[in-house]
Image (cartoon, rainbow, N blue to C red):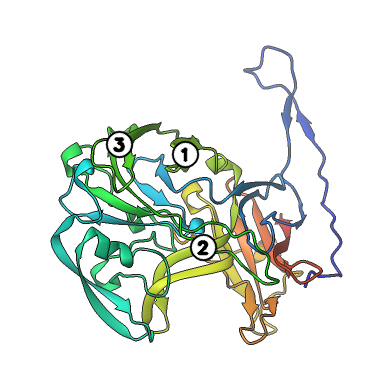
Amino acid sequence: MRNKFLTLIFFVTATLITSCSSDDNSGTPVVSTPPSSGGIIDPEVGGFNQPNRVYVDLSTGEQIAVNRDTWEIAVYNGSENRIFLNNALLVSAAELESITDITTVTETTTLTSPLTLNALDQNFSPTTVTVNTVAELMQGLPVGYTQYGDLDASISFTDSKEGELTGTAFSEISTTDSDNNVYVVNLGNEIPTTNNGSLNTTGDPRGFMKIRVLTDGSSYTIQYAELSNTTDYSEITVSKDNNYNLTAVSLTNGQIVDVEPMASDWDIDFGGVFSYYGLQGNLAAGLTYSDYTTHNTLGGVGLYQITIEDDTTPSFTNFSITNVNEANFVYNDRAVVGSGWRSVDYMTGETSVREDRYYIIKDTDDNYYKLRFTAVESNTGERGFPQFQYELLQ
């Protein structure tokens, strides 16, 4: 439940006016706004179906909420040529080795080499399957407990949870066109609209498409079509914009979509829903989480967790700038927070905030903050209403 002892108060900071710089010939004072000293923020995730992905800039206290079903893939704007999947929508993708003509691919297409993949049978016992056609591959492509893959062989049809460039389901896009294969893309799942009194984030399947991506190093050309289309395909060209980590694309609407803020303008992402292929106990399968939180590793944000184990660990209240350990900041794993900030009683469905941990963040402006979660549900007990408190360390 929402913490009744916390009032919704934002700390207000004054605007500083400094003297004109020597380059300023207009006589206009240079205005500098200091970072927010902190406050309490309720990310607008949206309730029981967690329809929004929310980007928060700690230094301004601002948040941007974007519907998570407005895009399926995103292009990377850095020096490498990478494609990311919308894991908040459970999008997955499989490369068709040595197949480069998108018009030749249908469900009946035979793979150039059979794939032997790990799976779980109807009793959730480990098994293997041999995949010979696109149709057979599609059966194990959707994210779920029975999703196909093989971690030991580095075969995963989702992006890694850590979010590193080498962990994308798509291979790096080559500037040599003939090196770029066709992919079958599972478009994920609809956002449910029925409130059944509990968490309900995964609706009906959205189907499949085939796509092929080309690049000249400064822009991407995305070819895409329905699997049944053997005559033509559509194209979208996306130029790299290094102001942003990623530029999102809607395959279903055939357009570029505004999703992420500028890379320097957000620190924490409350995706609500998050999916990847990984381990559950000793079993590998497609996993889906709710109430999931990541940080902006591609934008240079560092974060680490403080776990209160005994009296020698400073409490959230007592932690100060002198306690910061630069060596602890994690810049290569966006999922340090993940869903670990809350706990779920799977017998009763009751969800609560873990009070034994908080987080230290070095944001895109090199400000240091401490952050702790204070709610995971609304006052009426509905999931999808997180709340956190944060304070500037100085």
Rounded to the nearest angstrom, the CA distance separating label 3 from label 1 is 14 Å
Query: In the image, what residue occupies the spot 55% across and 43% down?
Result: 259
Mark 3 touching mark 1, by CB under 8 A? no
Graded by Cα atoms within 10 Å as few (under 14), some (14 to 19) or many (20 or more), the crowding at tag 2 reads many
Q: Nearer the viewer, residue 360 or 267?
A: 267
- Amino acid, disc 2: Phe
Q: Is residue 394 above or below residue 261?
A: below
User: Residue 394's spot in the image, x, y percent?
Assistant: 71, 54
User: Residue 133's spot in the image, x, y percent?
Assistant: 20, 61
Pair 2/3: label in front: 3
Q: Earlier in the sequence, mark 3 or mark 1?
A: 3
Q: Earlier in the sequence, mark 2 or mark 3?
A: 3
Q: Specify the quadrant of the image occupied by residue 49.
A: bottom right
- Amino acid, disc 3: Tyr
Pair 2/1: label in front: 1
Q: Specify the quadrant of the image occupied by residue 25.
A: top right
Q: Is residue 98 above or below residue 222?
A: below
Q: Nearer the viewer, residue 77 or 180?
A: 180
Identify the residue under disc 3: 233
- Amino acid, disc 1: Asn
Q: Is residue 49 above or below residue 254?
A: below
User: Residue 210's spot in the image, x, y percent?
Assistant: 31, 48
Identify the secondary structure beneath mark 2: strand
Q: Is residue 182 above or below residue 6?
A: above
Identify the secondary structure beneath mark 3: loop
Rounded to the nearest angstrom, the CA distance separating label 2 from label 3 is 30 Å
Q: Which mark is residue 274?
A: 2
Q: Which mark is residue 253?
A: 1
Rounded to the nearest angstrom, the CA distance separating label 2 from label 1 is 23 Å
